[in-house]
Image: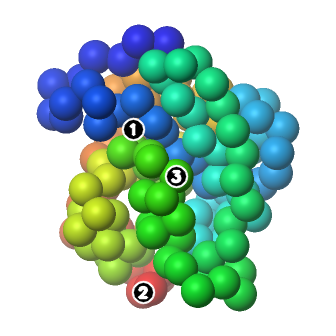
Amino acid sequence: MAVAREEAAPGDLMKICIPTEGDRGADELICPHFGRAPTFTIVDLEKDELKVIPNNGSHMGGSLLPPEIIKGAGAGVMLVGGLGPKAVDLFQDLNIEVFVGASGTVAETIEAWKSGELARATRDAACQEHQH
């Protein structure tokens, strides 16, 4: 599952996080609202491994923000359907690249990212209804 992207160092791209609806791995559907996703699926491209972690962030009653959980899991890339401007800023502060426009399953989302179909998240292009 090698990925070549110019904008980041190879080590930064080895673990990808995708907000998901459950724990079916590569066949799981992505969750359209990353902060309220029941799970996060972490894909390690270097090791060709996948693991699912629960979202125990602040939106779900925990104390950490979802981007902090994702950083703690070692992900350097986040693939989402969309997110708000505050989340874009927090991911940027944590040095996590975010790409928007994801849909379908985990496997479909990774393929869309690898083929350049997902756009880099920017504050200006963020979902304005997600002011968190």
Quarter assignment of residue 118: top left
Element at label 2: loop
Kindly check if marks 3 and 1 are in contact, taking CB atoms under 8 A apart as contact: no
Quarter assignment of residue 23: top right
Query: Is tag 2's residue or tag 1's residue first in the polypeptide sequence?
Result: 1
Q: Is residue 7 above or below residue 61?
A: above
Query: Is tag 3's residue or tag 2's residue first in the polypeptide sequence?
Result: 3
Give the residue furthest to the top: 2
- How many angstroms separate mark 3 from mark 2 (CA)? 25 Å
Front residue of 73 and 36: 73
- Which residue does the numbered mark 1 point to in the structure image? 118
Left or right, residue 93 beside residue 119: left
Q: Is residue 42 above or below residue 10?
A: below
Q: Residue at x 52, y 46 (%)?
A: 17
Colouring style: rainbow
The image shows residue 46 at horizontal and vertical percentages of 46, 19
Residue 101 in view (yes/no): no
The image shows residue 27 at horizontal and vertical percentages of 78, 31
Kindly check if marks 2 and 1 are in contact, taking CB atoms under 8 A apart as contact: no
Residue 18 in view (yes/no): yes
Name the residue type under label 2.
Gln
Query: Is tag 3's residue or tag 1's residue first in the polypeptide sequence?
Result: 3
Name the residue type under label 3.
Ala
Structural crowding at the residue carrying mark 1, measured as other residues with C-alpha within 10 Å and reported as few (<14), some (14–19) or many (≥20)? many
Element at label 1: loop
- Which residue does the numbered mark 2 point to in the structure image? 131
